[in-house]
Structures are given as C-alpha cells and as structure tokens.
Amino acid sequence: MSDDTSRRTHRAPAIVALFVLLGGAIVLQQSASSSADSPRPTRGSIAGPSVPDRAAVSSAWYCAEGTSTSDGRASETVIIGNLARHPIDIELTVMAGDQAQKTRRFTVETLAQRRLEIADVVEAADPGVVVEVFGGQAVVEHEVRGNDDIAVGPCTRQASRRWYFADGSTDRGAESWLALFNPFGDDAIVDVRFVTDAGVQEPEGAQALVVPRRSRVSVAVHDLVRRQPDVAISVVARTGRVVAEQSQLFDGTDTRKGIAVSLGVTSGAREWRLPSGNAESGATQSVSIANFSSRPTQVEVRVVGAGGGAGQPERVDLSADGVTRVDLGSSVSIGTEYALEVRAVSHVPIVVEGFGAWAAPSPVTGVASTPGSATTARRWAFAVGRLDDEGDALISAWNVGIRPITVQLYAYTAGDPDSPTSAPAAAVPPGERVTFSLGEHSIRPDQVLVVGADGPIVVGRQMIGGGVSLAPGIPFGR
C-alpha cells in the first residue's frame, strides 16, 4: 500500500492519511475477529488471582462455583482474609439470575478472617458471588462441601473472555460441572470445547451458550461428553466476559469419592509448577496436561524430591488439541514429599492441572485438584489454612531461584496490628522445598497466612481433615 501511495504523488495528503487510517482499522478489526474466534490459549502471562496493590482503594473478587440450597451439589462458604493493619469494609453480593440479588455489608477487623455461608444470604441453585473490598488489602477464597469432602480454593479478581481446564473426567460414577458466572450488566455468549482421548467434541448444547447478565450457568459436562476418562475444557466468549470454575464429584464407584474444585486459567504457558506433592499410602496422584493449540509438542514431567533431587524427566508426546494424564505412582515412593515441574519442549503453550484421590488405607478420604502455577513471587497469601482444630494443613514453598533463600510462614492474629507471629524461618537451597505443618506450629483455623521469602518461590496448600483439598497460594503483585 505504501509503494502504491508513493507513486500516486498527485493525491492529496489528507486522502492518503484517510486510507492509512481505514487500512489500519480493517487490520485491527480482522485481528480482533481472529482472536475472538480462536479457542487456543496465548503465550501471555497468567491472569490469575493476585493480592491487590496496597494503594488500591477497592478491589472486587468473583467466586463462581458453589450452591446454597439444601439439595445443592456443593454448599458454599466465602472466606475473606484482611491483610491490612486496620479494618476494611466488605460488600458481598449474591447474584442468582431471576432472583433479586442480595447484598450484605460488614466490616472485617484488623488482620482478621471472616466466613460467610452463602445459604445465610440467599437460597439459590446457581449463585454467583461478588466480594468488593474497600480500604485495604485482602484475599478471598471459598469453601465448598459435597460427597463427604471439602474443597477450598481462591476466588479470582478478573473475568475473562477465555478460560482453560486440563483435568476432568466423565467416567462412570463421576460428575463434572462447569460454572460460568457473568457479574456484568450485559449478557455473555460463549463457546465451550472439550478435548478428550477420542478427539475434540463441540456439542450443540455448549455452543453459543448464553450466560445472562448478573447470573451463573452450570453446565453438566457429564451429560454432554459421556464416559471419557480425560476431559480438558476451553471456554471462549464471543461477547462479554465470564468467570469459570469447575467441580468434579465422584460417588466411590471406582474408589474415588469426594469433591474437587479448581479455578480455570486464562491462558497457556510453556512451564508450570505444582509444589504440594505428598505420596501417601492409599493416595493416587496424577497430572493432566492439555494442548489447545494446532501444533503438537513434547512435554517433560520432572519430579523434584524433598531434598531437591530430581530424576530424569519423563517425556510425553502431546498432540495438537490433545490431553494426556501422567500417573505419578511409579515416579515417587510412599512417604515421599515432592514437587512437580511440567515444561513444553517447544514454544507451545500448555495447561497443567494436578489431581489426587485418597482412599483406604489412607486416614482420610477425598479427591482434590489444583491448577499449576505459571508465575513466581516473593510473597503469597491464604485467607485460611486449617479448617478446624482437628485437621491439619501443609503449606509448601518451593525455591525456584538459583541461590539459597530464607522462607517464613506468618500467621496473623485478629485485631493485633503488631502481629504476625511466625513459624521458625527455614533456609532453603536452590531447587528445594520447605513444608510447614500448621498443626505442629499451633496455627489456628481463624488465622490469615502469608508466606514470604527473599527470593522467588511457588507456594501451595494441602488441607487434611474432613476430606482433602489442594490449592495454589495467591501471589502478591510485583
């Protein structure tokens, strides 16, 4: 176009400028259209939950999965952790479609934790929850209970046009639910694709799916994609933005029994880490790896032992629009703590999610899933550690830097601006982990937690008691 324009020097400069502007607009429109139609993740950074900046006047958190009726699949409790050294104000709104939205306003005291059962606000089969925080830093998680099990994980601060999940199953005895929450004033329209061992499936009922404004839609994946051991999911909005979360319920048919909940990720990455592996008797653990791109790749799965020692990475072929599950039973010995690193050999973005199941002779029964972490930070937060005085939780911090660091676990005391108390600081060599038992350090269930280090770490939590739950920490922004 520029060559042609240079030859036609008799045309007025204004006309040339007009054509340049129109051409640029067409290119931008085509690029946006192509991006919107593509169901594949980008190479960008993960837009996951993070602790708001200290200077932020307000922040909003969105919780998608959970129910608040007596016969619901997953009774929901929202947990807010105040990280500020002064009280903060909260406005919690439950949106339930045709039902009038309900709002609760309250104050969370200095460095305190506040729990609120959604059933105490409104009874709804498909509630979406918005937590607005005013006047300070806070983190928001939610707890869901079902099938005699618990799952606790972070809510998110961002709605997105794209969401991805690597782990899912619609085997016999399994239910998979995709919760899509639209907290905004306009309807959203989304397409949902399922990647399985049998190929890509795009059921008619999951295309051009309307998520009405200020409401949540639950998609029964097990009704759309039947009897598949491995189901990865992509959600792409044609219009609007949503929040996506997945729950999996197992009835014990194949020894797996319980509920697992995981927040989706908004893009793929080349490298992922899961810091909270623990091989116990009666426990089986795996990692699911999904490729939503049009290019195949090889993936390296590396197990890092408690002392930082790593075996040879296992190489796995991953097809375009493919998903695979890697069982870790042959890679780790019973009684071993470990971390997991998953990396695409080529520059193809992948999505990674861990899954575990606990049954006899394990002292606990349940299932759990967790997305991997594709980012590092020096500080990570949790709104809650232990669920009750009887259970325990293990907080694992993995030194992913190249030099030794010191890691500390801080437990805040409600109302005490001079807190937190801390567990003994741990010196952690490069590539190694430290795990803190909250029970051993007498950290109470009502305490808000921060893990800090003088170098880059990745942090995860395993809850034990009343079931089992896995979740990543919530990193502080850079």
Image: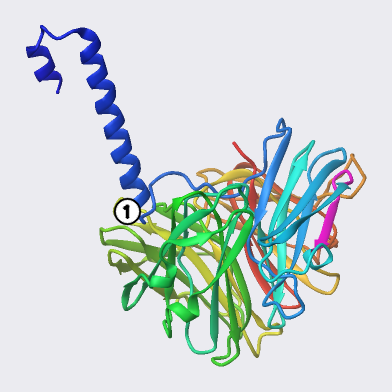
Please count the marks in the image.
1
Residue underneath mark 1: 348
| Residue 355 seen anywhere in this rendered image of the structure | yes
Type of the residue with mark 1: Val
| Residue 307 seen anywhere in this rendered image of the structure | no
- Measured as percent of width and height from the top left, residue 1 is found at 14, 23
Relative to residue 304, is residue 363 drawn left or right? right
Tag 1's secondary structure?
A: loop
In the image as oriented, which residue stretches furthest toward the right? Answer: 415
Which of these two is toward me, 33 or 151?
Answer: 33
Query: In which quadrant of the rendered view does residue 396 lie?
Result: bottom right
Relative to residue 26, is residue 262 drawn left or right? right
Relative to residue 85, is residue 41 drawn left or right? left
Please, is residue 27 above or below residue 175 in the view?
above
Figure quadrant of the C terminus? top right
Please, is residue 114 above or below residue 360 in the view?
above
Q: Which residue is located at x 32 percent, y 34 percent? A: 28
Q: Over which residues does the magenta segment extend?
A: 108-117
- Measured as percent of width and height from the top left, residue 326 is found at 42, 74
Residue 115 magenta: yes
Q: Main secondary structure of the magenta part?
A: strand
- Measured as percent of width and height from the top left, residue 414 is found at 90, 49
